[in-house]
């Protein structure tokens, strides 16, 4: 995996985390709902049919939420590892300007327009992107990709 692909992977993991959080939030109210079921039973002779209502929460939803939380935890750990390595990579970039561009883009997740505004009055979206792309071209290998470790 090259640097550009790794940076995309970082953004994709963030999106996965958002989706998992949405799934969990959608299921949580359902896990608190009370479900009801009727159980038929018989007693001793003479046979009498009794209907008993049972109330509780649906354990299947709880299990599903727990599975999503486990996946979420794994994704958070992976994201944290990649982000720490990315910050180490950013610290090694040659100029403060380039470090700021990469920090704004990949740590703060800002758009190119916002980055250009933060970089000052002489910065344009195109100039910021070109500086960014030059660094990507120079650093083809990814310093924080799993296969390097």
Image (cartoon, rainbow, N blue to C red):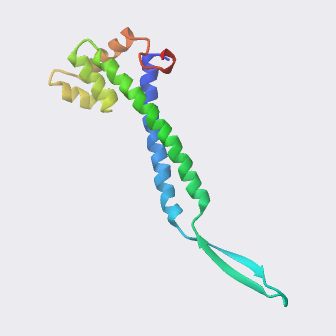
Is 43 on the left or on the right of 7, as rendered? Answer: right
Q: Residue at x 84, y 91 (%)?
A: 46
Percent coordinates x, y for residue 37 in the rendering: 66, 73
- In the rendered image, the vertical position of residue 108 relative to residue 145, given as above or below: below
- Residue nearest the observer in this picture, 9 or 116: 9
Q: Residue at x 58, y 53 (%)?
A: 63
What is the residue that sits farthest to the top in this orientation?
Answer: 138
- In the rendered image, the vertical position of residue 19 relative to residue 83, given as above or below: below
What is the residue that sits farthest to the front in this orientation?
Answer: 44
Percent coordinates x, y for residue 12 in the rendering: 46, 32
Is 62 on the left or on the right of 103, as rendered? Answer: right
- Residue 93: which quarter of the image? top left
In this rendering, the count of numbered labels is 0
Q: Residue at x 49, y 55 (%)?
A: 26
Is 31 on the left or on the right of 88, as rendered? Answer: right
- In the rendered image, the vertical position of residue 140 relative to residue 46, given as above or below: above
What is the residue that sits farthest to the bottom in this orientation?
Answer: 46
């Amino acid at each position: 995996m090259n640097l550009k692909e790794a940076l995309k992977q970082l953004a994709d993991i963030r999106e996965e985390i958002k989706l998992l959080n949405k799934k969990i939030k959608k299921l949580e109210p359902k896990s608190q709902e009370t479900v009801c079921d009727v159980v038929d039973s018989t007693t001793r002779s003479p046979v009498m049919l009794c209907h008993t209502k049972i109330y509780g929460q649906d354990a299947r939803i709880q299990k599903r939420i727990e599975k999503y939380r486990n996946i979420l935890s794994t994704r958070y750990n992976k994201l944290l590892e990649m982000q720490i390595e990315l910050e180490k990579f950013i610290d090694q970039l040659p100029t403060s300007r380039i470090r700021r561009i990469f920090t704004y883009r990949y740590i703060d997740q800002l758009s190119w327009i916002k980055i250009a505004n933060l970089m000052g009055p002489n910065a344009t979206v195109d100039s910021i992107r070109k500086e960014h792309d030059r660094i990507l071209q120079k650093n083809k290998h990814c310093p924080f990709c799993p296969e390097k470790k």
